[in-house]
């Protein structure tokens, strides 16, 4: 799997490892030998307080308290229904990926 980290709260977010679902957050989905970030790669313009790397997705909290997620969105793991901005077929038939950070809308009915 992939991994992500921040040096200190409120600083740049870096991810490395497989990027076949866009889980590194650079806006691209890697294919073939270029599908792995071998060194820490900054998520463009993203400053994070906290981060969590899932199977093929990433979630992070920005300094303003908003939650963002990206990567494999086949089962809604990035917090929104599949949309036109997702890349269809990224992991095979009937799969969807969100390769750039996408804000997770939290409503009062979500229980959070």
Image (cartoon, rainbow, N blue to C red):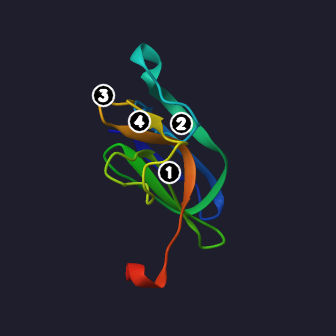
Q: Nearer the viewer, residue 63 or 96?
A: 96
- Mark 1 in CB contact with mark 2 (< 8 angstroms): yes
Taking 31 as reference, is 11 above or below it? below
Answer with the quarter of the image where residue 91 lies. top left
- Sequence order check: which comes first, mark 4 or mark 1? 1
- Work out whether residue 103 can be spotted: yes
Residue at image mark 4: 21
The outermost residue toward the top is 33
- Work out whether residue 112 can be spotted: no
**Could you tell me which residue is drawn at 44 percent across and 23 percent down?**
35
- Sequence order check: which comes first, mark 4 or mark 2? 4
Q: Position of residue 17 (x, y in %)?
A: 41, 33
Q: Position of residue 10 (x, y in %)?
A: 65, 63
Residue at image mark 1: 5
**Alpha carbon separation for disc pair 1 and 3:** 28 Å
Residue at image mark 3: 92
Q: Nearer the viewer, mark 4 or mark 2?
A: 4
């Amino acid at each position: 799997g992939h991994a992500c980290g921040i040096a200190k709260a409120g600083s740049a977010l870096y991810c490395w490892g497989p990027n076949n679902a866009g889980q590194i957050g650079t806006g691209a989905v890697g294919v073939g030998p270029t599908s792995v970030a071998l060194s820490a790669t900054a998520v463009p313009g993203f400053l994070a307080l906290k981060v969590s790397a899932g199977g093929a997705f990433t979630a992070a909290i920005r300094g303003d308290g908003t939650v963002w997620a990206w990567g494999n969105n086949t089962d809604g793991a990035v917090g929104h229904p599949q949309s036109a901005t997702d890349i269809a077929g990224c992991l095979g038939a009937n799969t969807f990926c969100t390769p750039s950070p996408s804000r997770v809308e939290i409503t009062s009915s979500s229980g959070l």
